[in-house]
Image (tube, rainbow, N blue to C red):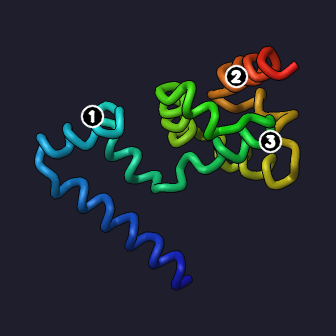
Amino acid sequence: MRDTVRHWQRRWAQAWELEALGQEQREALARDIGVPTEMLSALVARGPDAAAELPRLMGALSLDTDEIRKIHAALMRDMSLTCSSCTAAVRCREDLDAGNAAARFGEYCPNAEVLRELKGEVRAVRP
C-alpha cells in the first residue's frame, strides 16, 4: 500500500510540475523531446515507464534497440510514443513475461508493422 501511495504522489508531483511551466516552457520541452505540446500531459500521466515494453519486445524479436536507435532515431521516438499510449500494454507485458510476445505481438501491437519491417531489414543485413 505504501508503494502505491508513493507512486501516486510521484505522478501527481510530475503532473503539477508540468502544469507549473509556462506555455513557452512547455512548447520548448515538447520541441526538445520531439512531441506535440498537447501530448505532454498524456505522457506525464502515463509515467516514465509507459513505453517499457518496447525494448523488451524488440529483444524478444532479436532486434538491437541501440543499433536501431543509431540508424532510425526518429522512428524509435515515434514507436516509443505509440507504445506509451498503447491500450494493450498489460497484454504485451503478460506475453513478454510468458515468452509468447514474439509469436503474438502482431495481434495487438500498434507498432507491429514497423517491427516486422525492421526485422526484415535486419535479416537483409545479416543473412
| Label 3 or label 1, whichever comes before in sequence order | 1
Instruction: Check residue 9 in the rendering and tell me which mark sits there, or answer none.
Output: none
Q: Is residue 99 left or right of residue 35?
A: right
Q: Residues within 10 Å of mark 3 (few under 14, many from 20)?
A: some
Q: Position of residue 34 (x, y in %)?
A: 35, 33
Q: Residues within 10 Å of mark 2 (few under 14, many from 20)?
A: some
Instruction: Check residue 118 in the rendering and tell me which mark sits there, or answer none.
Output: 2
Gap in Å between the C-alphas at discs 3 and 1? Answer: 31 Å
Q: Pointer 1: what residue?
A: 31
SS for callout 2: helix
Gap in Å between the C-alphas at discs 3 and 2? Answer: 13 Å
At label 1, which amino acid type do we have? Arg
**Disc 3, disc 2: CB below 8 Å?**
no
> Who's the residue at 75% across and 42% down the image?
59
SS for callout 1: helix
Q: Pointer 3: what residue?
A: 60
| Label 1 or label 2, whichever comes before in sequence order | 1
Q: Quadrant of residue 110?
A: top right
Q: Position of residue 64 (x, y in %)?
A: 70, 37
At label 2, which amino acid type do we have? Leu
Tally the marks. 3
